[in-house]
Image: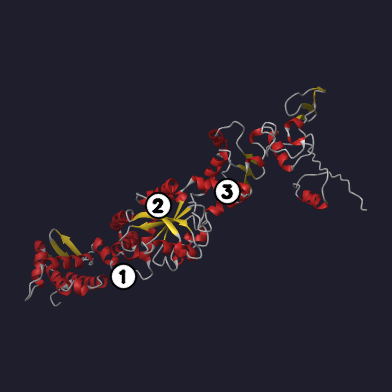
Amino acid sequence: DSVANQHHANLMEKAQRNLEAVRDAVTDVDTLAPHLRDLIGALWLRSLCEGNIRGASAAELQIDITSDAAVDDNLFAAELATIVENSFNIHEDGNRFLFKEEENPQAKLIASARNDKLFPEGEDVDQLAREVRYVIGGGEDVAASFRIVALRGKWLSDPWCEVEPGDVPDQWDDRIPVLVLPECPDKLEARLGEWLKNHLQKRRNAVRFLLPEQGSLPIFADRDLIVLARAVYLAEQWKQQQGAEYRRLQDKYERDLRAILKKRYDRFSVLASWDFQSPDKCRFNVEKHKSQGTKIPEAIDEAVRGNLFIPEDFSALVLEAAKGSESVGKLLKELQEPRPNGEDCIPWLGETLMKERLLRICARGDVAINLRSMEYLQVKTGEDENSAWLRMKSKLGFSGKHLDETYIVLPQNVPAAGGTSGEEEGGLFDDGSDGGQETGDTGTGQQGGEEGGGETGGSIFDDTTGGFTRYQTETPTSALNLMGKLENWSITPGVQVHDASISVSKLTGAQLTKLVKDLPDGLTYGLSIKKEDAG
């Protein structure tokens, strides 16, 4: 110190700080770096020299720490590498090591990343989880169809306390949830069955579990992955204040980390059968997806559709729903839950694909669909499946409450679609009166004050307000048949109708009250009734 200048003093301070940094970063420093103090001291002293001899080669440092016993070459090389990696003022100049006042950005970043004390709030775990989610679901095309949730270390006991608020089940939307497990559980089927019972109260049949390769360390216990995630996290924090070098390092360690993660997950699992009373007896299908990174979710989807989804089982379920005139909304909700009594589950393909398959069954003529009592989807007489599919495929695009008001029914229970007459369909909707057939309808009128008409379904007449076509039924019929008539007459929601009159031959006071209550607001009505006298 008596002969030191300011540069020498600064190097001493850097050497002391690096000594402490190595001690903080290396967990078992006495074993991995037994000559730490001697090596730091020797390197500092040799770094005081000027010119080409500043610093020291690895061989010179090995000689410096050798006293009365030889130092093993391999052990020394490993020890020196540990010290250099966890120091941030040691620089390499050719084959020589030396202390400099300026920091070595990469060495500083890695040394800090190895220091557990710098991440007290689990920032490293959060960063690693974000990287996992990005690697699996980074693209917009993936995010549009799948919700990627990276579960953390407490996934078995309290999975939702560690994930982001938007990833808890209450916030899930219609996207297929893909749950990325941090480890491959022992007794996989029993573990996943218990997990579904304890931690997921709905949509148990909709989730897909993404599993890491067998034999791999739990991801959040893998020291190498944690250090890489920390390096990415710190570089992102430091690049704003300390220059572009840390931006380059962030890119470097992101690439290294993501290259490992994209290969980490090679299998997936979906529920095969459910046992609520004994969840350890649940069965799961486990398959390889043979893809990497953002291609994994779609590969899983293809494997589920091609290998696990059985169309005949789905058709049978739809037919049962039609027999009970159940809503599409109810069917879709049931499909997202396990089937009872240990029955084999029908894999959930997502709302869009499930609706498409439902329409395919309708296009085959097995069922019909009542679209909110506004339109009926049913195969026409002589229509082939492909033509029916092309006509129907855009009809079931809505979701939510509309699906709860859309019903699956058997074909003979609905009017024929596309304006075909009841007579052409074989009188499927005849309720015992002849009012359900087109031949019972009349259409009369004038055109220019003369007898006119003769057109099928009605005649045309002209008055001071323009031309109209009048339709009417010959005899009273059911409400369902009236809906068929409106379709046959091309009365769509946008058509203007004048002078509508509905007659009811007999009804109760309760039925009349309900009828009046259900009349649309904003219109005026006239009412004429005949009341039976008491006694």
Residue 423 figure quarter: top right
Q: Quadrant of the N terminus?
A: bottom left
What percent of the width, then of the height, locates residue 224?
Answer: 28, 63
- Answer with mark 2 or mark 1, whichever residue precedes in sequence: 1
| Residue 125 numbered tag | none
Q: Residues within 10 Å of mark 1 (few under 14, many from 20)?
A: some
What percent of the width, then of the height, locates residue 419?
Answer: 66, 33
| Front of the two marks 3 and 2 | 3
- Answer with mark 1 or mark 3, whichever residue precedes in sequence: 1
Q: Secondary structure at mark 1?
A: helix
Q: Is residue 209 left or right of residue 489?
A: left
In-front residue for pair 461/158: 158
Q: Is residue 470 visible?
A: no
Compute the Cα span from label 3 to label 2.
26 Å
Which residue sits at x=74%, y=46%? 520
Residue 235 figure quarter: bottom left
| Residue 399 numbered tag | 3
In-front residue for pair 10/59: 59
Which residue sits at x=25%, y=61%? 106
Residue with the mark numbered 1: 116
Residue with the mark numbered 2: 138
Compute the Cα span from label 1 to label 3.
49 Å
Q: Is residue 345 left or right of residue 107?
A: right
- Answer with mark 3 or mark 2, whichever residue precedes in sequence: 2
What percent of the width, then of the height, locates residue 428?
Answer: 68, 37
Q: Secondary structure at mark 2?
A: loop
